[in-house]
Amino acid sequence: MTTIRQLLDKKGHEVFSVSPDDTVYDSIRKMADKNVGSLVVMDGNKLVGIITERHYARNVILKGRASPTTRVRDIMETNVVFVRPDQSVEECMAIMTERLVRHLPVIDQGELAGIVSIGDLVKDTISDQTFVIEQLVQFIHGTR
């Protein structure tokens, strides 16, 4: 069973962030430049929110706001669902499903240690299943 710590060690701990006072336009541009679907919102070293493409679509476009003048603080999610590094990939998938989120910041001893997306979790699960299938095929064919 893969832990989030192991997953982050493979994929990396890099996290892209914005400030609550940044514009939504700059945030969306940063997401596009970094090819990510979310950014954590940091006030200094403190995690205060998360902004995703979904927040943009629902709280800017659909409400007729202008992204160059709307601040991140006006649309970000402040009730951030997060996980710990010792939690399993399976636990995190269940949390994402239950809470209807696609990105989970990872908090280790009060510090932001990384972020995982549903894509990261699915990729890891497929990799684990592929390994098990290969081992079973080798066992069945007696090549082990």
Image (cartoon, rainbow, N blue to C red):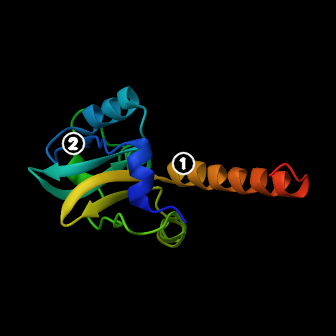
Give the residue type that dot 1 points to.
Gly
* Quarter occupied by the N terminus: bottom right
In the rendered image, residue 110, in percent from the top left (x then y), is placed at: 18, 65
Q: Residue at x 30, y 41 (%)?
A: 14
**Crowd rating for badge 2 (residues with CA inside 10 Å; few <14, some 14–19, many 20+):** many
In the image, 29: left or right of 111?
right
Determine whether 89 is above or below 73 in the image. Answer: below
Residue 90's disc is: none
Q: Residue furthest right?
A: 141
| Residue 131 or residue 51, whichever sits in front | 131
Q: Residue at x 40, y 30 (%)?
A: 32
Q: Secondary structure at mark 2?
A: strand
In the image, 109: left or right of 28?
left
Q: Residue furthest left?
A: 44
**Crowd rating for badge 1 (residues with CA inside 10 Å; few <14, some 14–19, many 20+):** few
Answer whether labels 1 and 2 touch (C-beta < 8 Å).
no
In the image, 7: left or right of 73?
right
Residue 67 visible somewhere in the drawing: no
Q: Secondary structure at mark 1?
A: helix
| Residue 66 or residue 138, whichever sits in front | 138
| Residue 31 or residue 131, whichever sits in front | 131
Q: CA distance from mark 1 to mark 2?
A: 22 Å
Q: Residue at x 82, y 51 (%)?
A: 138
Name the residue that disc number 1 marks. Answer: 119
Give the residue type that dot 2 points to.
Val
Name the residue that disc number 2 marks. Answer: 18
Residue 15 visible somewhere in the drawing: yes
In the rendered image, residue 98, in percent from the top left (x then y), is placed at: 52, 73
In the rendered image, residue 43, in percent from the top left (x then y), is placed at: 11, 52
In the image, 143: left or right of 119?
right
